[in-house]
Image (tube, helix red, strand yellow):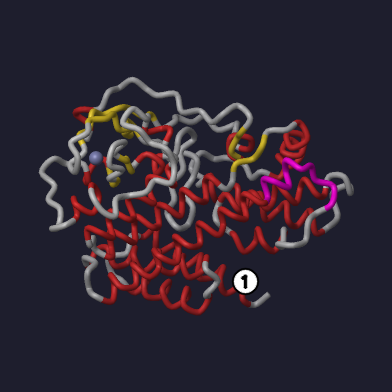
Amino acid sequence: MGRRVSTTPLRMVSPGTLLGISALLVFSTPVDATVLGRQKTTCPVCNQQFEAVVLASVDTSAGVDRDLFARSAGPQPVFHLIATCPRCYYSGYVADDFRQEIRFPKGFVDQVLTSPKLNPGMTITPTTDQRMIPAAVRYRLADQCYRWRGMSDESMAWLCLRASWVARDRGSILPRTDRLQRVMGFIERWLPPDDRTTNQADRELELATRLAAELAEGRFTRYQVPYVKFVLAMMWRRHGENDLFELLLPPGKPIAGLSPLIVGKIEQARASIGQERTWQQRARECFHRALDAGEIAPRNQGPACYILAELYRRLDQANRAIRYYDLAMSKPDLDAHLADWARQQRQQVLSMESR
Ligand SMILES: [Zn+2]
């Protein structure tokens, strides 16, 4: 993929009014950002030429969630793995599914070009820039193409897992208001020190745990409480700890004292949780079928079991999560780092269950 990549970095900064939590919280950490480039691409279905966005260099210094979602300080790499042809909407991984030598199953090209065709649900013309097509749309179209192409359960599983990360990231953007900035400044005192080797995701979750304890101890004024709750819930949302988000902000029970902007953000976060879970359920089914069918290579079975355990944990099925953490740890090839995480996550499930 590297040889045709233009090195001109694209400006992919979020709109000025929006800022991710980590950009507010982890500003003390010097980071490189992921750099995007352009690659002339020809659609293997309709031959339309367009400029795909590709990753010229990848940075994951903003941490890795326990289901392996690696974040960049800048544009998220996972958002730019999938391209969509602006003419026929054929979609897939830029690096794999747009190869000119790719072969499609009989009937697939007709499905895309003639009937039933792909429906992006928005206006896309041959001159539409890739960045104007939301990642969620590109993933949904790729999912449809993968189904029509009869791709393996393992490929489907990873595609659905990545789509769940897109939903997570889109659903955890904080509005930048003076009030929130003040709250963020105030809670920074509980941010664990950054020793440069700490996973930033762990650091933020540690901050969330400390903040929850302070909240429970009544450390904040009644004017601060609604905003602290919102920030805390969004920290959990950011890492896909969605049960904790819902526990703090239960649906149907609005918190008094929040501005309409924040109330709207909470609704958006809630909707994005629904989308994330739908993708997670699909990923879970596909990983299951792939494992049961013996489709996954022996060296990848440990990670697949681990991911399956994480999906069960996140979908609130504790017993099954534990079974798959155990299964992952029983695989001789499991990477030591993942084995550590499996042990820690298993312990966390047990401690949540005993509450
Ligand atoms: Zn096309």
Q: Residue at x 33, y 20 (%)?
A: 8
In magenta stretch: residue 307:
no
Q: Residue at x 27, y 42 (%)?
A: 88
In the displayed structure, 124 sits above or below 299; it is: above
Q: Give left or right: position of 143 versus 62.
A: left
Q: Nearer the viewer, residue 153 or 49?
A: 49
Residue 256: x, y in percent?
84, 52
Residue for badge 1: 352
Q: Nearer the viewer, residue 277 or 26?
A: 277
Residue 144: x, y in percent?
32, 55
- Residue kind at label 1, given as amino acid type: Met
In the displayed structure, 40 sits above or below 339; it is: above
Q: Give left or right: position of 3 versus 26.
A: left
Provide the secondary structure element on which disc 1 rests.
helix
- Where does the N terminus fall, quadrant-wise? top left
Residue 162: x, y in percent?
40, 52
Residue 287: x, y in percent?
34, 67
- Ligand 1 quadrant? top left
Q: Residues within 10 Å of mark 1 (few under 14, many from 20)?
A: few
Residue 308: image quadrant is bottom left
Q: Residue at x 38, y 36 (%)?
A: 124
In magenta stretch: residue 263:
yes
Q: Give left or right: position of 154 versus 179.
A: left
Region of the chain picked out in magenta, as a range: 256-266
Q: Residue at x 34, y 72 (%)?
A: 288
